Amino acid sequence: MDQAIRKLFPATERFAYLNSAAVSPMPQTAIDAVTTQLNDVARYGSEHYPEWIKTKNRARALVAGMLGVGDEQVAFMRNTSDGIAAIAAGLDWKAGDNIATLGREFPANFYPWRNVRDEHGVEMRIVPERDGRYEIDELIAAIDGKTKVVAVSAVQFGSGFRADLERIGKAAREHDALFVVDVIQGLGAMGFDLPAQYVDAAAGASHKWLSAPEGMGVMYLSDRARDRIKPAFVGWISVETPWDFDDLEQPFKPNALAWESGTGTSSLFYGLEQSLKLLTETGLTKIDAYLDELSTYLCERLADTNYHLISSRERGERSAIVCVKHRGGLTSQEIYEALRERDVIVSARGDRLRFSPHFYNNKEDIDRLMEALPD
């Protein structure tokens, strides 16, 4: 990847930072943009409010482009959890409905469905992870005429398994189920075409592979999903003409924007726009290919070491997330602490050690990791 990109990320000066699946460092351009907006408020108050809204909508258009959807099908939320919870709470559930999902999902993509299960007597059909991967045939077999939602992550946080969204989504559509995808572990590291992948609704957030400030979630609703999901919480900008304060009986917006309940974090949208521009201009296809090369190099370096590779490296299933276990009994937390002392930043996730390089990393970062890994 271009050395100029690496220079935009101050964290690379000190760290071998391999932890974008948790929180990514931000480029200096994003930091500068945030402070520009804050200084604007300090000097002018709300005088430039229209430009804040334009910035937010430019960021929306960039996110929509990454997902392959229309701008007004994307709403900004606080985080991924809010997006999935809003989808789950807005559906009309009945006893006898079921949800098909995967085991070891991140809690943001489990607790909202568990809540539905407990409140409405809905069945959860959970396909287990086996050896770091899932049998998609098993998930498809769990979908039937009573399935209201199929809920999966595009990329699994604890294994790096990349789901075949198009195949799953097509099976869900054949049974008239909504296909809901947690995209946070892919958004910014790979491209999406959600309509072509039969995805009806999706949620993600800004602070991982988007390399943007924390606190901005995104939720996508297709027209099909919007017809079935009611806004679970609304506010003054959820309606068609929010500045008409006299008409309190006006309709809600007919698209995903109905879920934006109030004003957002304007300064953070300035940072988000810059990070999205950097990713888009670099090219998500190019980033995806580069991360495949970098993660493959990492796996090659791990071969013949005392680390057991958990993540599937099959084509179509592998991602930039690589998870391992130590064969000799060292815990993931012990290894994490040892690496942290040498300024190599990774994650401990349960009994697994997780590496997640991004487009600002290079092979020298991988070599530095290998030198620091306790054997």
Image (cartoon, helix red, strand yellow):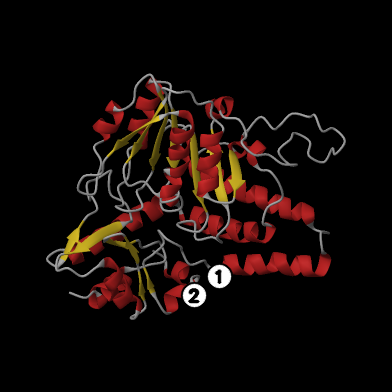
Residue 10 x %, y %: 49, 75
**Is residue 281 shown above or below 24?**
above
The answer to which of marks 1 and 2 sits earlier in the sequence is 2
Q: Looking at numbered disc 1 in the image, what kind of residue is underneath it?
A: Gln
Residue drawn at (66%, 36%), measured in percent from left and top? 258
Q: Is residue 236 left or right of residue 150?
A: right
Q: Is residue 104 left or right of residue 111?
A: left
Label 2 element class: helix
Q: Is residue 183 visible?
A: no
**Is residue 31 shown above or below 179?**
below
Q: Number of labelled discs? A: 2
Q: Quick check: marks 1 and 2 in contact, CB under 8 Å?
A: yes
- Label for residue 28? 1
Residue 108 x %, y %: 45, 47
Mark-to-mark CA distance, 1 and 2: 7 Å
Q: Quadrant of the C terminus?
A: bottom left
Q: Quadrant of the N terminus?
A: bottom left
**Is residue 45 shown above or below 262?**
below
Which residue is outermost to the top?
Answer: 145
Residue 253, image quadrant: top right
Q: Is residue 131 left or right of residue 293?
A: left
Residue 321 x %, y %: 32, 56
Residue holding disc 2: 10
Residue drawn at (35%, 61%), measured in percent from left and top? 356
Q: Is residue 9 visible?
A: yes
Residue 38 x %, y %: 71, 67
Instruction: Decide which of 101, 225 is in the foreground and name it.
Output: 101
